[in-house]
Amino acid sequence: MFRIQFRIRSSYGVLLRTLSVLTLLPVTLLVAPTMNRAQAIPPDSPSAPTAISGVRQYYLSPVLAPANAARSACTDGYHFASIWEIADPSALKYNPSLGISSPDSGNGPPTAISFMGNPLVVRGWVRTGFSYSVLDSPGQANCANWVSDYGFYWGTTANLPSTWTSDQQDIGVWSVGVSTCDTSLRVWCVQDDSVWRVFLPLTLRNT
């Protein structure tokens, strides 16, 4: 709360200066809080007090690779994805400029592409989080930690479900399988990191 006291003398010059102060005072009181707020908020901050920009991206590689080349199949800024990094596609953004698409993909990932006039489910190599394994068990098979292309070793693959009827109606999870390590498949790639900008609510205090 502001308390303003004025003392006006009979001097003509003092009276003019006092009237000038009274005229400028309301403008000063209105401008000062605005200037303080402008200095407190970064110039490029969004209008909302709290905002987050940037969503992690992923894609399915257009190139095919045997298992031992999966770790080098992703472009700069992306890496060979673990299933646990892309388990929830609704929290990610698919990058169609880097990955393959189908006619009905929209801005999302494809479930199948046309091959010789027929739909072909698109699978990709995916990391599992498991230790060394070459057995044909989805979630464990990883082609000896993705260093082997041996035809009798196995690696885990993942694709988004394209059959939504009867007992295969669950579209909330990935479909996983295995393939021999010498098979050339696409690779699921995920962004190394995304840029997050967080601005906390601004608190102004009168002193």
Image (cartoon, rainbow, N blue to C red):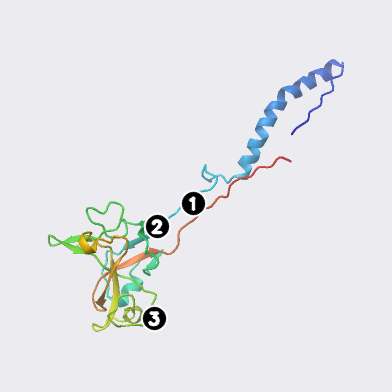
Q: In this view, does 169 lie to the left or right of 23?
A: left
In space, the residues marked 1 and 3 are separated at their CA atoms by 36 Å
Q: Mark 2 or 1 closer to N-term?
A: 1
Q: Type of residue at label 2?
A: Ala
Kindly identify which numbered label has been placed on residue 52: 1
Evaluate if marks 3 and 2 touch, with contact meaning CB atoms under 8 Å apart. no
Q: Mark 3 or 2 closer to N-term?
A: 2
Q: Type of residue at label 3?
A: Ser
Q: Which residue is drawn at 39% across and 81% down?
A: 131
Q: Tell me which corner region of the image, top left, top right, bottom left or bottom right, holds residue 25.
A: top right
In the depicted view, which residue is nearer to us: 19 or 133?
133
* Residue, disc 2: 91
Q: From the image, which quarter does the N terminus lie in?
A: top right
Q: Residue at x 87, y 19 (%)?
A: 9
* Residue, disc 3: 131
In space, the residues marked 2 and 1 are separated at their CA atoms by 13 Å
Identify the element where label 2 is drawn: helix
Q: Position of residue 194 (x, y in %)?
A: 45, 59
Q: Is residue 202 in sight in this rendering?
A: yes
Evaluate if marks 1 and 3 touch, with contact meaning CB atoms under 8 Å apart. no
